[in-house]
Image (cartoon, grey):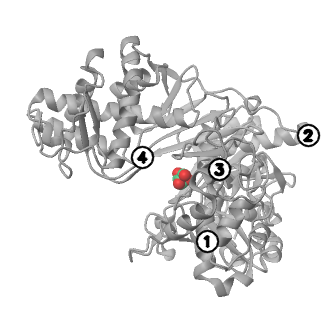
Amino acid sequence: MRVPAAPGRWSSNSAAAASASPLFLGLDCSTQGLKAVAVTDDLTVEHACGINFDEALPAFGTRGGVLASGDGSGVVRQPVCMFAAGLELLLDRMQEEGFDFSRVAAVSGSGQQHGSVYLSSDAAGVLGGEVASGTAPLAEAVEAALAEPLCPVWMDSSTGRECGAMTRAMGAEALARVTGSRAYERFTGPQIARMARTRAGAVPGWGGVSLISSFLASLVLGGRAPADLSDASGMNLLGLGSRGWDDGCLHACAAASEGALSAERLRELLGDPVPSWSCLGTVSSRLRRRYGLPSGCAAVAWSGDNPCSLAGLRLERPGDVAVSLGTSDTVIGTMEDASGSADGSGSASDGGSAGADGSAGPPALDGHVFASPTVPGGFMALLCFKNGSLARERVRDAAFAAAGGSADATAEDRWAFFEEALLSGSEDEVGALLARAIDQPEITPDLPAGDVLLSAGGEALLLAGSDLSAWMTSADRAAAVLRAAVECQVMSMRLAAEARGLRPEGALLVTGGGSRSGALLQLLADVFDVPVMVGETPDSAALGAAFRAKHAVMCGAAGGHVPFGDIGPRPAHRTAARPRPGHAKAFAARLPALQACHDRIRAGTAHAGAAGTV
Ligand code: XUL
């Protein structure tokens, strides 16, 4: 049903509408919902809208957007039809809000990375038929294109067996060097192997395997859309050097499926990936008819949420790096080359020597390198630190209590204490203690849960099982331990970034909730030894998708890639902190000690025989 527009709800934008700039629409299918951001030719946001899966589509029974098995298997899935229903609902809402679809020149999108959608053998016909031009609700129309109604997503941790099998087949270092990542449970290749192994009888009926991003692109296009190279890098299957499916990885994935899939069949199912700035065609006649999109409106390849955020934050030049401080802390940035972490020289398994790693020096095994979504042959890095703001808050509260703070104190009081404790450290005190607050097993680097405290001389100060509060026996000690714990979080970011060849040049952009802390910003400036800029880019993935839509149209018009920077002005960010030279030098000098501390944690020698031995 065509929903009548509701003039007035969008009246503040009528002047912009009158200017009739073309619009570029970015959609973002995240774990919890769908969002849309439309930008004008000068990249001004003209419209934004979103829906939450749990609230807007309760019939699918999701919590936080997902269906978690809850049986200890780690299986976490999402109903694929919910994406289709959500897309239609979102576009309906935009129409109700008076959004003028007739001005949209191109649509692109962002999908949560790593999830895999299993298509039926009829998928091509269904996508190009009922989905492209039918009148039934999209969620109904797409059902026959699916071989599996549920798709595993990035939160799924049921693929340990498949990760182990792929690692044995390729070698951990070769897998990391070829694909940019060692085998990770949330990655798509292991998901496909598990789905094939556990649903072996259904595999002959599969017509394809899409990423969540390329599946959503198929709905917009009305036809099977290819995966883009950047999102495809999150699968453990793509050769970063060859920019194509890697034979060794396909064989490793087939081996992990325990005979359910061959490498050749897997290659066929995946189809060929394309650069992220590819125009795939025009949007489907269903979307044109229902929403009034123009007939020439381009359907642009979708990408993953992290590549799209990179584009939304305008991290397009080598050395453009951003830190996001949140529940998990993340570091993303653009690199010209992948400096040994993924050597760009092609498959380790070319020639059939799977597992043989003849590279010079071991590659970094933590974090990920993906194909850049904006630069041909370029790279982006993504590092995810699981113990972010929750660990900071735990240590803050323990230190606050140990320093005599009242149990009834407000969050403001606690943050004020945090700021003072962090800023009170002189350069001579940097690294006087090394503290790691690890609430849940860390993935960057790989560290087991449990707090660790070492003296400057390397003496272990905590018993295994006791937490940092055990050493906070005075207000001074509490402040020193808090400072050390947060300093080590940030030093760990620099260690992991450098191991991946990622170095901020000129400045570091800081986003997320933690960027409200002036002390954290100062610490980041000191540890990375660059000025820190702050900027909030809400909905950076959807915004990045909108920017990429414009980029693809420009590339199409030019008949080849044009620099991403040509899309329009970069936002002006505010410089919030500058490195203090003495502190910066002291942090740089302590990085090897933190590296050694991590080695000791893994070796099991970072705990004392008795608490408080110093
Ligand atoms: C990145 C990752 C998540 C997902 C969902 O590797 O697993 O960030 O992309 O946001």
Disc 3 packing (10 Å; few <14; some 14–19; many ≥20): some
Residue 366: x and y in percent read 51, 46
Q: Residue at x 82, y 34 (%)?
A: 562
Q: Which residue is under mark 1?
A: 256
Which of label 3 and label 4 is nearer to you? 3
Residue 474 is situated, as x and y percent measured from the top left of the image, at: 9, 31
Q: Are marks 2 and 1 in contact (CB under 8 Å)?
A: no
Label 1 SS: helix
For marks 4 and 1 on the same chain, the one whose residue lies earlier in the sequence: 1
Marker disc for residue 559: 2
User: Residue type at mark 1?
Assistant: Ala
Residue at image coords 23%, 26%: 421
2 vs 1, front mark? 1
Farthest top residue in view = 581
Query: Which numbered disc flags the more N-terminal residue, 1 or 3?
Result: 1
Nearer the observer, 127 or 443: 443
Between disc 2 and disc 4, the foreground one is 4
| Residue 242 in view here | yes
In the visual, does 417 lie left or right of 6? Answer: left
Quadrant containing the C terminus is top left
Q: Quadrant of residue 69?
A: bottom left
Label 2 with label 4: CB-CB less than 8 Å: no
The numbered dot on residue 328 is 4
Against 158, residue 581 (above or below) is above
CB under 8 Å between callouts 1 and 3? Answer: no
Mark 3, residue position: 357
Which amino acid, mark 2?
Answer: Gly
